[in-house]
C-alpha cells in the first residue's frame, strides 16, 4: 500500500523527478518527460552540476561545457539555465538526493516568478554597487590627478616661465637643477599612480613578489615595520585570486596604519584545502565589532567583503578594543583558471 502511494506521489509531482541508478535514469515522472521534450536537457551534464562537478556560472548552456569557472554547489538547491529548441533560456532550480549507494533522486523545478523577480532585484543592486564602486574609483583618481599631478605640473610651468623671462644668469644652473629635481619627483608621482592602479609586479612576477614590493614601499612611507611570512612557494594563482588578495592586503594594512596606532604588523600567506589564506594582524587599538556598520565605510570592510564574495571567498574580521585586529581572507583556488 505504501509503495502504491509513493508511486502516485512520484507520478503526480509537479517537479520533474528522475530516479537515477549509476548515472542513468531508470524512471521519470510526467513532468520530467515534459521537461525533456520542451528543453535541451543533457542529463549527464546536469548530474555533474548536481554533484558539484559542473559549471557554476553558465550551468547547462552548451557554450560553457569547457568553461574554466568551477565551484561546489549545495546539492539541496543548485541553479540551472536550460534552453529550448528556439534558443530561449529559462531558469530552474535543482536538488539531488542520494537514496543509497546506487540510487539517487534528481528533482528539477522552474523558478517561480517571484524568485526570478527577486533575482532581478539582486542583480540590479549588484550592478548599482559595481557602478558606484567604479564611480568612487574614478572620483579618487580625478582627485589625485587634480591635487597631485596637476599642481606639480603647474608649479613646473611657473618655474620654467620665470626662468624664460628672467635676465639673471648667475643662478641659472641652480634653477635648472631645481627644475630637474621637480621633474624627477613628478615622474615618481606618475609611476606611483600607475602602480596604485595596477601593480606591474603582480602581472609580471606573481603574488608573493608583488606583496613584498608593496609592503617594502609601505614600510618606507609609513615607518611601520611589516613582517611578511609566506608559507607557500612562489607560484602563480588565478588572476582574480591574486588581484583580490593584493587589494584586500593593501586595504587592511592601510587601515591598521591609519586607525590602529601601530608600529608593527604581521602578514601571513598560506594554502589550505584548495584555499589561499591571507592574514593581517596588528596589536593596535582595535574597534567594536558590534558597531561594524559605522566603521565599514571608513575602513573599507564592505568593499573587501564584496571582493572576496565575488569569487566565493570569505572575509573574517576579528577585533577587540585595546587587543588589536586580525583580518583573515579565504579564497578558493580554481586551478583551471591558471594560465
Image (tube, helix red, strand yellow):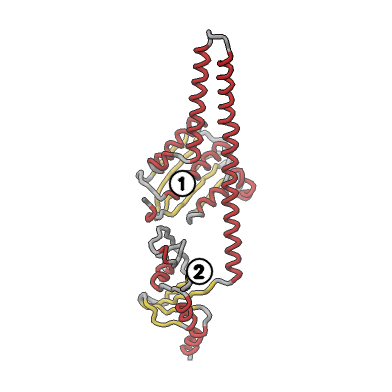
Q: Which residue is mark 2?
A: 89
Q: Is residue 4 left or right of residue 299?
A: left
Q: Residue at x 53, y 42 (%)?
A: 251
Please provide percent x and percent y for residue 256.
54, 39
Q: Residue at x 51, y 46 (%)?
A: 327
Q: Distance of mark 2 from mark 1, alpha carbons?
A: 33 Å
Q: Is residue 9 positioned above or below 294 on the image? A: below
**Sequence-first disc among 2 and 1:** 2
**For the residues carrying marks 2 and 1, which lies nearer the camera in this image?**
2
Total tally of numbered discs in the picture: 2
Q: Please name whichever residue, 216 or 244, is drawn nearer the observer in this view of the structure.
A: 244
Please provide percent x and percent y for residue 96.
45, 72
Q: Residue at x 50, y 26 (%)?
A: 185
Q: Please name whichever residue, 79 or 269, is drawn nearer the observer in this view of the structure.
A: 79
Q: Is residue 233 left or right of residue 113?
A: left
Q: Which residue is mark 1?
A: 243
Amino acid at each position: 500500500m505504501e509503495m502504491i502511494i509513493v508511486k502516485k506521489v512520484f507520478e503526480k509531482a509537479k517537479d520533474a523527478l528522475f530516479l537515477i541508478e549509476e548515472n542513468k535514469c531508470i524512471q521519470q515522472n510526467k513532468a520530467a518527460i515534459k521537461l525533456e521534450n520542451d528543453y535541451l536537457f543533457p542529463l549527464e551534464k546536469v548530474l555533474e552540476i548536481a554533484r558539484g562537478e559542473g559549471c557554476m556560472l553558465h550551468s547547462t548552456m552548451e557554450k560553457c561545457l569547457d568553461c574554466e569557472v568551477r565551484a561546489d554547489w549545495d546539492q539541496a538547491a543548485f541553479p540551472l539555465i536550460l534552453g529550448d529548441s528556439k534558443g530561449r533560456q529559462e531558469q530552474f532550480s535543482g536538488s539531488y538526493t542520494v537514496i543509497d549507494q546506487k540510487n539517487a533522486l534528481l528533482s528539477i523545478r522552474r523558478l517561480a516568478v517571484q524568485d526570478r523577480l527577486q533575482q532581478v532585484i539582486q542583480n540590479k543592486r549588484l550592478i548599482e554597487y559595481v557602478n558606484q564602486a567604479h564611480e568612487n574609483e574614478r572620483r579618487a583618481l580625478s582627485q589625485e590627478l587634480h591635487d597631485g599631478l596637476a599642481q606639480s605640473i603647474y608649479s613646473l610651468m611657473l618655474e620654467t616661465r620665470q626662468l624664460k623671462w628672467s635676465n639673471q644668469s648667475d643662478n641659472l644652473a641652480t634653477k635648472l637643477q631645481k627644475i630637474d629635481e621637480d621633474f624627477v619627483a613628478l615622474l615618481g608621482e606618475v609611476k606611483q599612480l600607475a602602480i596604485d592602479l595596477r601593480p606591474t609586479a603582480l602581472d609580471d612576477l606573481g603574488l608573493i613578489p608583488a606583496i613584498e614590493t608593496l609592503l617594502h614601499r609601505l614600510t618606507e612611507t609609513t615607518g611601520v615595520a611589516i613582517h611578511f611570512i609566506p608559507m607557500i612557494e612562489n607560484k602563480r594563482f588565478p588572476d582574480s585570486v591574486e588581484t583580490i588578495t593584493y587589494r584586500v592586503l593593501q586595504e587592511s594594512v592601510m587601515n591598521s596604519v591609519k586607525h590602529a596606532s601601530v608600529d608593527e604588523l604581521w602578514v601571513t600567506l598560506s594554502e589550505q584545502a584548495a584555499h589561499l589564506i591571507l592574514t593581517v594582524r596588528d596589536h593596535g587599538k582595535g574597534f567594536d565589532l558590534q558597531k561594524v556598520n559605522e566603521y565599514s565605510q571608513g575602513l573599507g570592510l564592505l568593499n573587501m567583503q564584496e571582493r572576496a564574495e565575488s569569487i566565493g571567498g570569505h572575509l573574517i574580521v576579528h577585533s577587540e578594543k585595546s587587543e588589536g585586529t586580525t583580518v583573515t581572507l579565504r579564497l578558493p583556488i580554481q586551478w583551471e583558471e591558471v594560465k
